[in-house]
Image (tube, rainbow, N blue to C red):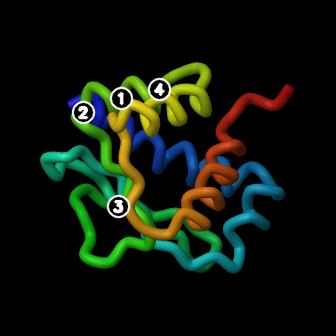
Amino acid sequence: MKFKLLLWLLAKLLQRAVKKNAECARHVKDKTLVFQIQTLDGAGRHFRIDDGKVRSAAGLTDCPKFTLVFKDAAKGFAVLSAKESKDAFLTALRTEDLVIRGDFVEVLWFQRLTDFLQPQK
């Protein structure tokens, strides 16, 4: 349940970042992308970037550009909520607690988008 709540919260945080941060709004302005984050057993959420907006819905979609697949909900929650998110992400990839399916270039674009969620220094 925490994993699903975290994915819902991620969508809300991305929506807020687009509204409040002009640089973030420029980052998504002309982008069209559908991706999803899920567990190996199929629990997850899909996200749609289009018309300068972030939309999200529970469940999976048929044709995402990429999918982040976590071994289980506990691993997904741990990685997505880690303070050192990039290190946790890379460690999860190395240990195969996270597998990326699809277009890796789009994953890099998404990682740049998540940088807007970090507190400004």
Decide if residue 9 is on the left or right side of residue 60: right
Disc 4: which residue = 81
Question: Residue extending furthest top?
Answer: 83
Q: Quadrant of residue 116?
A: top right
Disc 3: which residue = 46
Q: How many marks?
A: 4
Residue 27 percent coordinates (x, y): 74, 64
- How far is the residue under mark 2 from the one under mark 3? 15 Å
- Secondary element at image label 1: helix
- How far is the residue under mark 4 from the one under mark 3? 18 Å
Q: Which mark is residue 73?
A: 2
- Kindly check if marks 1 and 3 are in contact, taking CB atoms under 8 A apart as contact: no
- How far is the residue under mark 1 from the one under mark 3? 16 Å
- Kindly check if marks 4 and 1 are in contact, taking CB atoms under 8 A apart as contact: yes
Disc 1: which residue = 77
Which mark lies nearer to you, 2 or 3?
2
Precedes in sequence: disc 1 or disc 3? 3
